[in-house]
Image (cartoon, grey):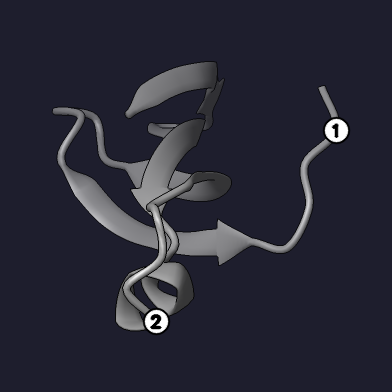
Amino acid sequence: MTIIKLDKVEDNWEAVAEVYEDDSFLKSMNLPPKNTRLYYAVKMDQEKEVISFERLTEYFH
């Protein structure tokens, strides 16, 4: 996982994380694995503890 964006919003932090995950469909078919790049929106409190996250359907840099 790599944090590619980090912003302070009021007293909290909002980040976008880039995550590479194995393609579970290919794995279930016993095909060679391929990493899929996914993006997650992450919200953290003042101590940088994660309070919520969700997968983004798309992300443009």
Residue marked by disc 2: 29
Where does residue 41 sit, x and y in percent of width and height?
A: 53, 48
Query: Which residue is pictured at 39% across the width and 81% down the height?
Result: 29
The answer for how far apart the CA atoms under marks 2 and 1 are is 31 Å
Q: Which mark is residue 42?
A: none
Q: Secondary structure at mark 2?
A: loop
Towards the viewer: 4 or 31: 31
Q: Could you say which quadrant of the image residue 1 lies in?
A: top left
Amino acid on which the number 2 mark rests in the picture: Met
Towards the viewer: 12 or 37: 37
Please indicate, yes or no, whether residue 14 appears anywhere in the rendered image. Answer: no
Q: Secondary structure at mark 1?
A: loop
Query: Which residue is pictured at 38% across the width and 72% down the height?
Result: 24
Q: Is residue 57 above or below residue 22?
A: below
Where does residue 32 sit, x and y in percent of width and height?
A: 39, 54
Towards the viewer: 10 or 30: 30
Characterize the local packing of mark 1: few (<14), some (14-19) or many (20 or more) Cα atoms within 10 angstroms. Answer: few
Please indicate, yes or no, whether residue 29 appears anywhere in the rendered image. Answer: yes
Characterize the local packing of mark 2: few (<14), some (14-19) or many (20 or more) Cα atoms within 10 angstroms. Answer: few
- Please count the marks in the image: 2
Whichever of callouts 2 and 1 sits on the residue coming sooner in the sequence is 2
Query: Which residue is pictured at 47% across the width and 47% down the height?
Result: 34
The quadrant of the rendering that contains the C terminus is top right
Residue marked by disc 1: 60
Q: Is residue 40 above or below residue 53?
A: above
Amino acid on which the number 1 mark rests in the picture: Phe
| Position of residue 60 in the picture relative to residue 37 (left or right) | right
